[in-house]
Amino acid sequence: IATSEKASEGKDEKADTQIKEETIPALTGKAMTLNSMVDMENPDEFSKAEERTEKQYRTLKSNHGLQAEVTLKAAFKVTDLCIAQYKLDRVDEVLAEIEGACSADKSSDKYTKFIQMKAFCRWKQSRFKEALKLFEEMKNRVGLSSKLLENMGH
């Protein structure tokens, strides 16, 4: 994931907050922020990345609102970083903020991502009955997978 280079080309200043999707190989011990890959084993680097991503999310939320795709992508990056550090209260806060935007169209990918993150958060909080209900919804939306079945089995 990388920021757009339109701003450096003299185009719209807001373009630098837009996100381009790129294929990035999965790496063990790494996490993605909006702009870079972070070593999860390095607490200082991870903390700085989390702080930068939180700041980006707040800025995008303020400038574009919660309905904007770019804001939702930033919100999901915040939840990814926070859940990796078991900052589950912060994950809950962000999910509560974006629930309305994600739930507006229940056939959308953003709603699927929302349900997936909420289910995983509930599972990590040992709120297994709530997690199971959300995993069931995931199963109905995307079908069975070995990872989903494994999470449901716990």
Image (spheres, rainbow, N blue to C red):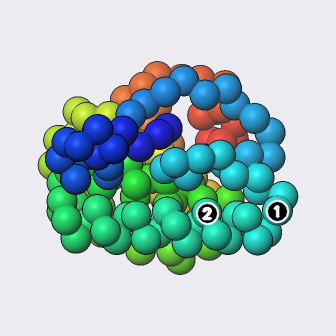
Spot the residue most to the right: 41
Asked whether 136 or 54 is in front, the reply is: 54
Disc 2 packing (10 Å; few <14; some 14–19; many ≥20)? many
Asked whether 144 or 110 is in front, the reply is: 110
Number of numbered discs on residues: 2
The answer, for residue 123, to whether it is visible in the render is yes
Residue that mark 2 sits on? 49
The residue lying at 75 percent from left, 35 percent from top is: 27
Asked whether 24 or 83 is in front, the reply is: 24
Q: Where is residue 118 in the image (x, y as percent from the top left)?
A: 46, 56
Q: Which amino acid does label 2 sit on?
A: Ala
Q: Counting residues from the N terminus, which is met first, the one under dot 2 or under dot 1?
A: 1
The residue lying at 41 percent from left, 43 percent from top is: 3
Q: Secondary structure under badge 1?
A: loop
Q: Which amino acid does label 1 sit on?
A: Asn
Q: Judge left or right: residue 115 versus residue 44.
A: left
Q: Secondary structure under badge 2?
A: helix
The residue lying at 38 percent from left, 34 percent from top is: 20
Disc 1 packing (10 Å; few <14; some 14–19; many ≥20)? few
Contact (CB < 8 A) between labels 2 and 1? no
Residue that mark 1 sits on? 42
The residue lying at 49 percent from left, 50 percent from top is: 34
Q: Judge left or right: residue 74 versus residue 41.
A: left
| Quarter of the view holding residue 147 | top right
The answer, for residue 69, to whether it is visible in the render is no
Q: Where is residue 50 in the image (x, y as percent from the top left)?
A: 58, 66
| Quarter of the view holding residue 43 | bottom right
Q: Where is residue 113 in the image (x, y as percent from the top left)?
A: 41, 43
